[in-house]
Image (cartoon, rainbow, N blue to C red):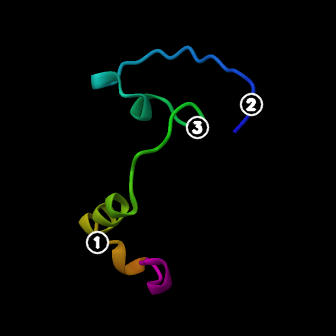
């Protein structure tokens, strides 16, 4: 990350106004996990398309 101070002006129409939902990029961290990704891939029956070496 940069050592300079930054300011962000964020307008939201997102329910609960959580920064990780509103903003993307360097403004806020992504709190999703590999388990979240796995659940979505399984929900849409895509998990089998991921190479075995990348599943763990």
Q: Secondary structure at mark 1?
A: loop
Question: Label 3: how many residues lie within 10 Å, few (<14), some (14-19) or many (20+)?
Answer: few
Q: Secondary structure at mark 3?
A: loop
Q: Which residues, given as a range, are shown in magenta? A: 50-56
Residue depth check, mark 2 versus mark 1: number of the one nearer the observer: 2
Q: Residue furthest bottom?
A: 52
Q: Residue furthest front?
A: 3
The one of 56 and 47 positioned closer to us in this rendering: 56
Residue at 49% from the left image edge and 84% from the top image edge: 53
Q: Secondary structure at mark 2?
A: loop
Q: Position of residue 6 (x, y in %)?
A: 67, 20
Which numbered disc flags the more N-terminal residue, 2 or 1?
A: 2
Residue at 34% from the left image edge and 24% from the top image edge: 14
Which numbered disc flags the more N-terminal residue, 2 or 3?
A: 2
Q: Position of residue 17 (x, y in %)?
A: 34, 22
Total number of numbered discs in the rendering: 3
Does residue 21 lie above or below 43 as drawn?
Answer: above
Which numbered disc flags the more N-terminal residue, 3 or 1?
A: 3
Residue at 34% from the left image edge and 66% from the top image edge: 38
Q: CA distance from mark 2 to mark 3?
A: 16 Å
- The residue beneath circle 2 is 3
- The residue beneath circle 3 is 25
Residue at 47% from the left image edge and 82% from the top image edge: 51
Do callouts 2 and 3 mark residues in contact (Cβ within 8 Å)? no
Question: Label 1: how many residues lie within 10 Å, few (<14), some (14-19) or many (20+)?
Answer: few
- Residue 26 occupies quadrant: top right
The one of 7 and 41 positioned closer to us in this rendering: 7
Q: Which mark, by number, is residue 45? A: 1
Does residue 39 lie above or below 47 as drawn?
Answer: above
């Amino acid at each position: 990350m940069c050592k300079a101070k930054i300011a962000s002006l964020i307008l939201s129409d997102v329910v609960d106004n959580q920064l990780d939902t509103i903003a993307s990029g360097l403004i806020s961290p992504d709190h999703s996990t590999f388990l979240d990704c796995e659940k979505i891939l399984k929900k849409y029956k895509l998990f089998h398309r991921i190479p075995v070496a990348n599943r763990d």
